[in-house]
Image: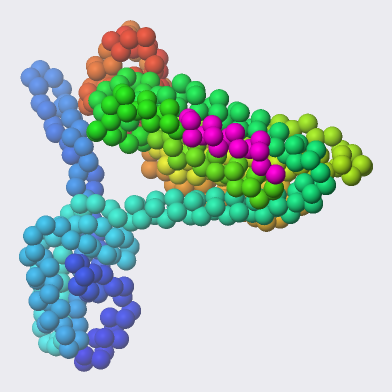
Amino acid sequence: MSGTLLKLAEQYLQCSYRGVPFVVIGSGGQAGRKQAEHDYPYRDGVWIEDLGKRARVYYVRGFVCGPTALVQRDLLVNAAEASGSGLLVHPSIGAIRASCTSFAWSEPDGVMGRVDVVFEFVEQKNYLTTLVQLALDAAIGAAALVVRSASSSAYLTATTSALAIGSPAVVAARTVAALWGKRASDAVRSPRVMAAAIATLPGNNGRYAAGNSALVDASATVSSVLTDLALFRSTLDKKISTLSTLTTADSLASAVQDITEALRSSINDPGAQLVVLQPLIAVPVDAIDSTAPIGAAIATAKTETARLCSMAALASFAQACAGWEPTSAQEAETLRLTVATLLDDAATQAADAGFDDIWQAIRTLRTQVTQDLSQRASQLPDQITVERNQPLPALVLAQQLYADATRAPDLIRRADPVHPALMPTQFQALSF
């Protein structure tokens, strides 16, 4: 009998709670939103007040069997009686942290070596979504690293012989890199970067310094923020100034990629990272085709250096997308189309130039970035148009639309009114 039950158990999927395994034969659940019904005199119907998401409840039925069935039963009893929440690993629900609110077990009549179990869980945190997001972010970082490596290798292959011809080719390559670096230096002095630095300050610093997923430093002050920003700009300027002194393809490739990563990692706001890096992807170059050896070397040096700068900025731009947090499905979809177009254009240019490794690396990066943004868009609310007959305060509109006055800052950011007390009669808002 025991051997038959063990063979039967192998046909079912396994589950575990607090590390204690058991077999799953059926599952169910409940979800929804908490609603409060309010009745008023002389008014038909009721007013429903939304109180937020209801706790997700899961019902799991299973069994343990074999010579250790009673031991496993006792371990599950101890797991159910333990205080606090525990890790539930379910074959279809995934990995979640849950509290066991009910546990029951029974031994079927006439069956030896089997104990049926029934659980009721309340979810505390969904680890599967976090793990998927971390995996996507890591995949984007790895794909961006491959793009940088492939572009550096291609640059070394294409320009080593050209730069060896003489100083005119070296000067041409340095000139393209220095002009591109000057644009990076100007970009880091933009108001958007200043606003990103202010976003790290604790407290309400206004709608123009809210930032996107910016981390707040509780110990930061205005003086420390400005000092760090000035130090960052000074360090970046030193990196850019070295571009006009380098003489080898290897050193140029390393310096260019160091600049884009310094821009990305030193700006706290992912939204500001995207704004700063996107203009650096397009690198104009005035290379003139020539049949003369020195003319051809100069043209190659200019064209390939421009491609190197563009690839470095594109890889950092794609990596910045992983840290950016859209607030609506439309925002995520817009960025997905933007980055997909940029990567498609870069892949086409690499393929036309015969760089198969770069083409393959860009296609892989495109897959990872677009998958990440599509996954985020599927979980976000839509953006809708709201119309009112007259201007109303943002707090009133937040209460009317969401029954939550704390949503007013989001409405203010989207509508950008002259004053929050006089919101425009037509503006964009989230659907929920």
Residue 1 visible (yes or no): yes
Residue drawn at (89%, 39%) of the image: 290
The answer to whether residue 402 of the structure is visible from this angle is: no
* Residue 127 quadrant: bottom left
Query: Which stretch appears magenta?
Result: 233-247
- What quarter of the picture does the N terminus occupy? bottom left
The colour mode here is rainbow
Percent x, y for residue 39? 10, 26
Q: Position of residue 31 (x, y in %)?
A: 23, 48
Q: Quadrant of the C terminus?
A: top left
> How many badges with numbers are in the image?
0
* In magenta segment, residue 253: no
Residue 71: name its quadrant: bottom left
Left or right of 274, for residue 103: left
- What residue sits 55% from the left and 37% below the top? 239
- The front one of 102 and 225 is 225
Query: Looking at this view, is 296 or 216 the one in front?
Result: 296
Judge from the rendering whether residue 213 lies leftward or rightward of residue 405; answer left or right: right
Give the residue furthest to the right.
291
